[in-house]
Amino acid sequence: MTKRKTGKDYRKELSELNSKERILKAAVNQRLLELTKAYPDIDLPTSRAGGLKCKDIAHPWIIQETNIDAVIEYIEAIEQHLANVHPHKQSAIEFPDRDCISDKSPDGKHQYEGDSKHCTHCGFNKNYF
């Protein structure tokens, strides 16, 4: 038998959600403060004449008074700027296939049987590199 929620249950649940929201907003605000101090000359999206740079809002009290949606928009703008300036892309390192050192190999290349990962002539593991 399920128990119906009471007003007290709803009040407790709402209090917990409000607490989580305050913690999340504080974390988001802190992240923007860190980014604005680290990158003071990045332009931020604004309709303000003359533009807006990170250094213009790099103060806790300004960020706390800013709408949370705008704070997130600023974080995204800074991250996008950094991604455009430093487009690092991890690529795989490719090693050339070594020649088989066994005299039994007719063409000097490794020979593998079926799903084996080891050369039938010299034992080279093709997954080693």
Image (spheres, helix red, strand yellow):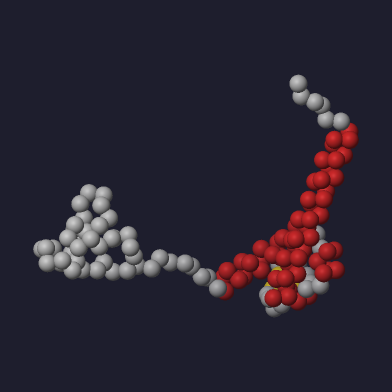
Q: Is residue 87 left or right of residue 9?
A: left
What is the quadrant of the C terminus in the image?
A: bottom left
Q: Quadrant of residue 48?
A: bottom right
- The single residue placed furthest to the front in the displayed view is 123
Give x and y (percent) for residue 91.
43, 66
* Above or below, comparing residue 76 to residue 50 in the picture: above
**Residue at horizontal 13%, vertical 63%?**
105
Return the x and y of residue 38 as percentages of the image width and height. 69, 76
User: On the picture, is 40 further left or further right than 100?
Assistant: right
- Residue at the image point whose x is 84% and y is 42% from the top: 14
Does any portion of residue 22 appear in the rendered image? yes
122 lies above or below 37:
above
- Residue 107: in sight, yes or no? no
Q: Position of residue 79 (x, y in %)?
A: 63, 67
In the depicted view, which residue is nearer to us: 11 or 110? 110
Quarter location, residue 43? bottom right
Looking at the image, which is closer to me, 39 or 43? 39
Q: How many marks?
A: 0
